[in-house]
Image (tube, helix red, strand yellow):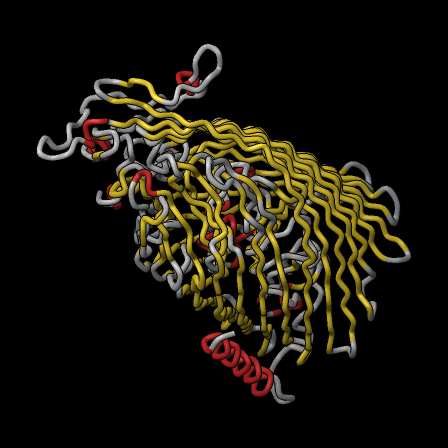
Amino acid sequence: MGMMGRRIVTMARILLCGVSATCLTPGSAFAGEANTAAPEDGTAGKNDMQGLDEIVVTAQRRSESLQRAAIAITAVTSDELTRTGIVDTAGLTNVAPSLQISNIGGPVNNFYLRGVGNFVSNNLSDPAIAVNIDGVYIGRPGAVQGMFFDLQRVEVLKGPQGTLYGRNATGGAINIISTKPVLGEFSGYANFELGNYDARKVNGAINLPLGEKAALRVAGQVVDRDGTYSDGTGDDKQQSVRAQLSVELSDTVRTTIGADYAHQGGLGAGATVKGLDPDDRIGLSDPRAQAVYASSFDFLAGDTLHPLSRDVYNRNNYWGLYLQADIDTSLGQLTILPAYRRSSIDYRTTATGFYSPYIEKTDQNSLEVRLASKEGARLAYIFGLYGFSERSSGDAVISFQYINNYFKSRTKTDSYAAYGRLTYSITDQFRLSGGLRYTIDDKSARINQINATVVCPGVFVPAPAGPQFCFGGPILPNTYGSEAMFFTPGGTIIPVQPFGAGDIVTAAQSAVDASKVFRKLTYRVGAELDVSRASMLYASYETGYKSGGFFVTIDDPSFKPETISAITIGSKNRFFGNRVQLNIEAFRWDYKNQQVSLFHTNSVGGVDFVTQNVGKSRLQGIEVEGQARIFAGTTLNATAQYLDAKNRQFVYSSAAAAGAPTTGCPVSGPVSGNYIVDCSGKRPSQAPEWTYQFGIEQRLPLGNLGSLTLNADTRYQSSVYTGTELLDKQKGYWMSNLQLSWSSPDERFSVAGFVNNIENKNVVGFSQPNPAVSSLVATSLRLPRMYGVRVGASF
């Protein structure tokens, strides 16, 4: 484990023992009923005299209080989602200290949890952080747009999810749980929001009873906001709708049928250029950024780059269907969950600093069947079977202007799994658990790619004449179908041909037609101890796995599975009449063959987007979370996380054909035509050492005039590497939010004024060096200061 690991575990033991020994003695003040059952809607009532609210989660496939779940989890309630204005996954970074999510172009988000994640921009690899909507796994990370409305809560699970979930996830999972229909109730709400950047948002829902045994809930949202960069990019245009029908077919059979649709439009994500003032938020098609491109020199082409245009767009559509049937049997509750989802993505972006048009169509089918024992059994069990099928096609152009990559991919994934978990209560206070999951992933890919490179022969002229450049030449076309220029009428590729004034263009074709079956057994063991009715200790050891796959290059086109082992030791506690909560978690994760996706120069000088196994990494630390209701209307909360993250073995190669790779790591060579990049010992990307969050909620009753509520919170994050090259860093920063809201006495009407990112910090969320011109770095910024007014009404 190493000295640092032993120190962290020892510190955790001291903290946990301190809590159990000093805070939970018979004379301690705590509410014996602190962990009482909570309502099924996920939150308890807001009677201040009852102490802190309870949150119900289903992260372990059972309804249980968050404080009784012996796992590493953060839950974000619907109220918090509304208050912080979250409309997509990227916004979760502000409320979950473990998460780092940034948009990197089109609908693609970069997910990292405690420094674990991967750059999933196409259909050739799986995410390390799984996203599930109402229990249905979403295979493509870009297909989760338009989900964030009418939600009951969002659960962020930290660490491998190897025994209870549909698809394996090594880094964690994000569970999005929508609000379900309520039988026998006619109700609804509507929220209207206006803000800066001409932001307009409308969302609402209506719940309709259909007799005594059925109910229909329909919800929708429209978001329309102008771009946050000077060229109009970074806008948000989306429309979403969701309908769900719940029916009690009998006393023992309940069903819910759901359908949803979302459209994402607008110009899409934006970026600026490193070196320009981020506070000016200068977009890439702004003349000031265009001037930087026009002065950036591509030595191989013997010419400067051309300015980027604003020819960008999002035309993305997502829809899905699911049916959940819950059947009470003598053995427990049987759940059957079939689902279908389709995403149709069509976008063109320059947010990564280069032209990248992409079309992808994905169909996925899944079926999960699981049996959970009845509540209160001494031996509790969950058994399940899972099947997943995905068919995806993608057409893309990755254009660095003088180096282009044209590729078409057709991928298939069929995944099957059987899993089970047993929990045995040795005493009423002490439980042991164990789980197993066996997974078979059958993957295949057919990929065709053309690498095209513009070369100015004169740049290689030796002294004394010296290099002769090719200024004023054209760039390679970056539209679909333009790769036809590299073929003869008979279909034979043209390896070298004239291009522009003095240039030549070289082209190489490569293809992959491969399939492989990956098999893996993952497991979990754990122990739980109720120190009192309001406090518990828990520990677990769990393994995780993510299958390998394929990409296209003229070099080795495959990567191996990655695996993880995780140790977690934690304590969850409530004291002083249920008014104080203190949760502590210590963790250590060890990765092998970790998958990292990045741009890579191949052996003929072309640029490929590849996924490589880079060896081993270690992540360990402590997270402490506390809440306190210090007065009847005053609630404080605080969270702190320390993360010790290190690449123990991170070595990869880059072909020397186009020069040394762009990286912040030591480079050796070239040897045998390759540079060797060694990032061992460095901190991983998106892994801040320290993260803090502090917040306060102050409620002020106004009698017959209703009530006022003030919410204020702030978040600190220490410096992080913002790209996989470990080259650029975002310095540590604070970011704060404020909301003042009024509610009517019956809480049916509300008005709120809010401001998010009070400091107006323009924070870099992701950075991407241009593989053709290493000094040119595009940086994606998180949202600037956002403020506005929100009005709500319910019945």
Is residue 40 rendered to the left or right of residue 303? right
Query: Hey, which quadrant is residue 208 in on the image?
Result: top right
Q: How many marks?
A: 0
Q: Is residue 162 above or below residue 488?
A: below
Residue 207 visible at all: no
Q: Is residue 156 above or below residue 479?
A: below
Residue 12, percent from left and from top: 52, 78
Furthest-top residue in this view = 489
Q: Is residue 63 above or below residue 68?
A: above
Closer-to-camera residue (784/708): 784
Q: Residue at x 56, y 49 (%)?
A: 560
Residue 509, percent from left and from top: 45, 27
Is residue 607 rendered to the left or right of residue 299? right
Furthest-left residue in this view = 464
Is residue 155 rendered to the left or right of residue 598? right
Residue 692 visible at all: yes
Closer-to-camera residue (614/754): 614
Q: Quadrant of the C terminus?
A: top right
Q: Residue at x 80, y 65 (%)?
A: 380
Is residue 253 rendered to the left or right of residue 534? right
Query: Hey, which quadrant is residue 442 in on the image?
Result: top right
Residue 42, percent from left and from top: 65, 56
Q: Residue at x 73, y 49 (%)?
A: 417
Q: Is residue 349 above or below residue 17?
A: above
Residue 295, percent from left and from top: 18, 33
